[in-house]
Image (cartoon, helix red, strand yellow):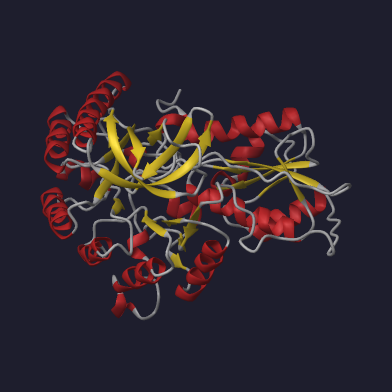
Amino acid sequence: MPENPPDLRPDLAPRAVLPTDARAGQPRIGMVSLGCPKALVDSERILTRLRAEGYAISADYAEAEAVIVNTCGFLDSAKIESLEAIGEALAENGRVIVTGCLGADPAYITGAHPTVLAVTGPHQYEQVLDAVHAAVPPAPDPFVDLLPASGVTLTPRHFSYLKIAEGCNHSCKFCIIPDMRGKLVSRPHAAVIREAERLVDAGVRELLVISQDTSAYGTDWKDRAGAGSHIVNLARDLGALGAWVRLHYVYPYPFVRDLVPLMAEGLVLPYLDVPFQHAHPDTLRRMARPAHAEKTLDRIAEWRGICPEIALRSTFIVGYPGETEAEFQTLLDWLDEAQLDRVGAFQYENVAGARSNALPDHVEAEVKAERYARFMAKAQAISAAKLAAKVGTRLEVIVDAVDAEGATCRTKADAPEIDGNLFIDEGFEALAAGDILTVEVDEASEYDLWGTPVA
């Protein structure tokens, strides 16, 4: 069995929030969206196209005339979760169309579930629509079926993912994303800005910028002279729209330092999500990753010098093939020195097709679990100390939800679902999701804060 349950998978998207409004007699399609925010954006695009053709979206298996399952294939545990989701949809509905990363290997899916109606790969929108048309013919009413200006979104109305590129040019040995999604293809600058403007006009207060390698945006264009400036220019233009702009999946290239002044100026949130993966040079070489951890520490110090309030987030792999106790200890020591604000980790597991499977000296499951526990204990202690230092300070937060018990918010250092929260349990009655306000921090735990609104 794989070591990592779904809650240890990196980069999971928030749970999809399906719109359920429908007119009488309108054909209904269900959607199960698994995996990362990039897959969630693909689900939104599919549903937007379906809504434009007159389909309603069903959040219930029984009411749907067919169900689309958008799968994840990042890890073997993710593949198992996808197969289980397909099986559940078949049992509850019976008419299932499969798409997403796992769809790049149709035989894997049909071998387990031969009765699925169709299998398509990642971002193959036309093929998904063809499969839906064959299973459930459209019945549009152009006088009734109105598509929201922002399209169909599966996140709360006040934040939205903004995908700026597809694919990846890296060749990390543990990853098969380039095989499933192809090489880097950046979206045109103007197209990204137009989409962001539509989202902000529709009430989105926070844009979460995503791709497989956000800092590589534009490096695939013929004019390579601007490599590095493309993402800086895009971030600057996004920041001018007036919403919070949060950058995810930023590799630590030297030119990232040019993004940090935008954070110091307030144009972009002081938050960088950087996939460091490990710290020991030998481990990084076996991963086929840049192996200059000491330079990374220098860059972190440089970023903090430019923008002292910057929050740094990263994910790491524990128990990579060949990882010795000394290499793991180097990772712990590096984490002590780096003092990252938000840290996640998962235990290495083989992925079919990944080159790391063939590496020698795979780490025993018990050792991986023990190292994972030690790593997370270290990260938790760092997080607790950093959050304790915020008690008594004032922070700007965005409200995600309000109920009878209080308001759940996030600071600028917290991305939805993957980071911590700030809770308000007094003086929250007039707040609503999407509000941005200043709070004074009263209390801290290992990952979360509590605060009081400042009048």
**Whether residue 442 is situated above or below residue 48 in the rendered picture:** above
Give the residue at the far front of this rendering.
Answer: 455
Q: In this view, does 37 lie to the left or right of 385?
A: right
Q: Which residue does the image show at 36% across and 45% down from the upper left?
A: 455
Residue drawn at x 55%, y 53% as measured from the top left: 41
Camera-nearest residue between 367 and 395: 395
Q: In this view, does 7 lie above or below 30?
A: above
Tell me the quarter of the picture where residue 409 sits: top left
Instruction: Point out residue 64 in the picture as x, y percentages from the top left corner.
Output: 78, 39
Image position of 447 (left or right of 283): right
What residue appears at the point 33 percent right and 35 percent down from the top-left corner? Answer: 451
Outermost residue toward the top? 366
**Residue in front for this viewpoint, 134 or 65:** 65
Q: In which quarter of the image is residue 303?
A: bottom left
The reply to whether residue 280 is in sight is yes
Outermost right residue: 25
Name the spot of residue 12 as percent of width and height, x first. Answer: 46, 40
Whether residue 318 appears in this view of the structure is: no
In the image, 330 versus 389, the foreground residue is: 389
